[in-house]
Image (spheres, rainbow, N blue to C red):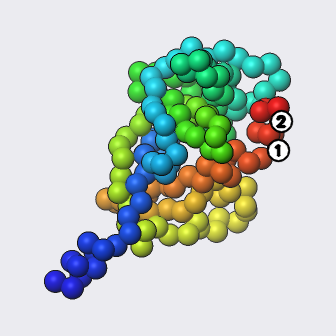
C-alpha cells in the first residue's frame, strides 16, 4: 500500500515519442508545438547537410532538419508514416523530420537513467537520458544540444 502511495506521488515527465530506424526517441512534450504530415520544403543554399530547408507555417518561416542525418543515420525519403515535429526552442520554431510519431508517454523521473558512457562525447551529446519502456529502450533527446552547435548557429544567421 505504501508503495502505491509513493508511486502516485512520483514525479512524471511526458515525452512525445518518435522513431528513427528501429529506435524509439522522445522529446519533452512541453517543447512540441505540433506534428505535421509532409509539407513542401524549400531548400536553402549553403545550409548544413542536415538542414532540408524551410517551410511556411501559417506565415512563419520554419527551418526543417533531417533528424536522421543530424543523428548520423543514413538519409531516407519521406513516406506516408513520416512526420515533421515542430518544436520551440528559445522562441525559435524548428521542424524535425522523423520516420514516424508514436505516442505521448508518461515516464516516471525515477526511471530515467543518465546517458551511458559509450566512449565519446559526440555520440551521446544529443541524449538527455534513457528509460526502459516495455522491453524497449526510449532515448530521451536533449534538444538544446541538438541545436547548440556552431553549424546550426551559422544556418540561422
User: In the image, is residue 43 above or below residue 48?
Assistant: above
* Count of all numbered marks drawn on residues in the image: 2
Report the side of 49 relative to 102 (left or right).
right
Q: Position of residue 3 (x, y in %)?
A: 24, 82
- Name the quadrant of the N terminus: bottom left
Q: Position of residue 98 (x, y in %)?
A: 51, 34
Badges 2 and 1: C-beta atoms under 8 Å apart?
A: yes
Instruction: Report which residue position mark 1 lands on.
Output: 150
User: In the image, is residue 128 above or below residue 95?
Assistant: below
The residue positioned 35% from the left and 57% from the top of the image is 106
Quick one: which residue is furthest to the left in this view?
1
Q: Secondary structure at mark 2?
A: helix
Q: Position of residue 115 (x, y in %)?
A: 58, 65
Front residue of this view, candidates 20 and 110: 110
The residue positioned 65% from the left and 37% from the top of the image is 92
Instruction: Report which residue position mark 2 lands on.
Output: 154
Q: Secondary structure at mark 1?
A: helix
Which quadrant of the structure image shows residue 40?
top right
The residue positioned 41% from the left and 21% from the top of the image is 80
Do we see residue 21 in this rendering?
no
Do we see residue 124 in this rendering?
yes
Amino acid at each position: 500500500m505504501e508503495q502505491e502511495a509513493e508511486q502516485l506521488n512520483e514525479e512524471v515527465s511526458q515525452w512525445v515519442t518518435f522513431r528513427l530506424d528501429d529506435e524509439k526517441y522522445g522529446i519533452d512534450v512541453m517543447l512540441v508545438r505540433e506534428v505535421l504530415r509532409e509539407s513542401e520544403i524549400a531548400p536553402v543554399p549553403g545550409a548544413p547537410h542536415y538542414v532540408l530547408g524551410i517551410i511556411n507555417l501559417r506565415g512563419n518561416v520554419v527551418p526543417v532538419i533531417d533528424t536522421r542525418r543530424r543523428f548520423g543515420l543514413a538519409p531516407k525519403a519521406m513516406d506516408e508514416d513520416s512526420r515533421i515535429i515542430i518544436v520551440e526552442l528559445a522562441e525559435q520554431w524548428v521542424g524535425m523530420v522523423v520516420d514516424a510519431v508514436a505516442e505521448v508517454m508518461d515516464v516516471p523521473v525515477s526511471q530515467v537513467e543518465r546517458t551511458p558512457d559509450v566512449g565519446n562525447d559526440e555520440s551521446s551529446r544529443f541524449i538527455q537520458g534513457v528509460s526502459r519502456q516495455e522491453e524497449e529502450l526510449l532515448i530521451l533527446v536533449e534538444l538544446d544540444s541538438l541545436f547548440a552547435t556552431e553549424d546550426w548557429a551559422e544556418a540561422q544567421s
